Amino acid sequence: MTRSGMSTLAIGFGATVAVLAVSSSGTSAQVYNPITGCYGDTAGIAPEVCYNHPSGPPSQPPPPDGPYASIATSSTTFVVGASYFESSQSDSDRDAIKSCIQNHGGNDCKVVAWTRKRCIGVATSPADGSTGWSGGVDTRLEAWNGALAECRKNGGKNCKVMTTPCASDTWQWSPQLPLPPAPKDAKLDARTVGTWALDTPAGHWIWEIGEGGTYEFHAETQQIYEPSHAGSFSAANGKWHLEATAGGFVDVDGGTYSFQGPNVMYMTGKLGAGTWRRIK
């Protein structure tokens, strides 16, 4: 995708990809958010005019009567929009619909779930024409399970969790997903289990690998939006593999890994290499 005066290229490592738009002058960079269709969209909720804040997003005080979160979906396109850390239900619903529309969801976007101080989730199966969502629950995993169950109950055979926002999520970056339920036949080097961080110029990438062979990735970066995603993960004999099956990024990746001590892991992937440090 290109814009006037900009070119695009893919960047990333291992579990994540972003699209970087570089100005023709070479003096600044903006990241394209593939979910909302905006450049510099740090919250995952597209503003009325998509643009980048060169100095990063402004600070935002806690909502006085909240926080609230909402999810909106389109019944024809199955596009999803979300809002969180909102001061009222009306603001939350409005911004979720706006996000859905600006994600190219169409004019039939409507709010399907909202919560105050809790978590919600939505799953879709476009091939089957099915959508399901959870009501307000205490954890992201409950929101995940509730959304999947409703999607399947509504006839979905290939239901995918799209997002699990909690009302208190920080508005600077995309909401996390929970660590998915573990499969029964995971092949996993136990040394890879834990929560790992990779430092970037804009913040940190956080990669949680569960002992059951699943993972969750999210970015804590204020100027570069990267969608959260989750799925299956395996590692053995110096080689790793993942399949992202939930969130704003779907892909298969793999590469090599080696340890430089118990808390430092060097990994290669199809988009490059990086050194991850254990934080949990």
Image (cartoon, helix red, strand yellow):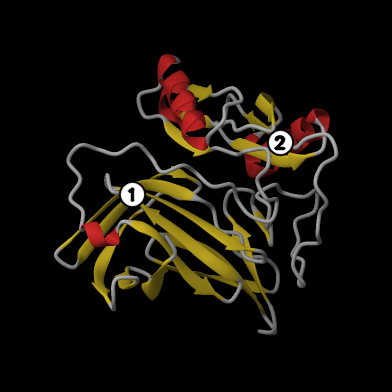
Q: Is residue 18 left or right of residue 69?
A: left
Taking the spot 65% from the left edge, 38% from the top edge, the residue there is: 82
Residue 8 x %, y %: 56, 70
Taking the spot 54% from the left edge, 67% from the top edge, the residue there is: 204
Using the image, determine if residue 84 lies above or below residue 33. Answer: above
Taking the spot 37% from the left edge, 64% from the top edge, the residue there is: 14
Q: Which mark is residue 220?
A: none
What residue type is disc 1 on? Gly
What residue type is disc 2 on? Ala
Residue 207 x %, y %: 43, 58
Using the image, determine if residue 227 lies above or below residue 156. Answer: below
In the image as oriented, which residue stretches furthest toward the right?
A: 64
Query: Pointer 1: what residue?
Result: 210
Q: Is residue 149 left or right of residue 106?
A: left
Taking the spot 59% from the left edge, 36% from the top edge, the residue there is: 80
In the image shown, does 256 or 124 lie closer to the viewer? Answer: 256
Q: Is residue 157 visible?
A: yes
Query: Pointer 2: what residue?
Result: 96
Quadrant where the C terminus sits is bottom left
Q: Is residue 155 visible?
A: no
In front: label 1 or label 2: 1
In the image shown, does 263 or 181 lie closer to the viewer? Answer: 263
Residue 264 x %, y %: 34, 73
Give the SS element for disc 1: loop
Using the image, determine if residue 124 lies above or below residue 24. Answer: above
Using the image, determine if residue 201 lies above or below residue 130. Answer: below
- Disc on the earlier residue, 1 or 2: 2
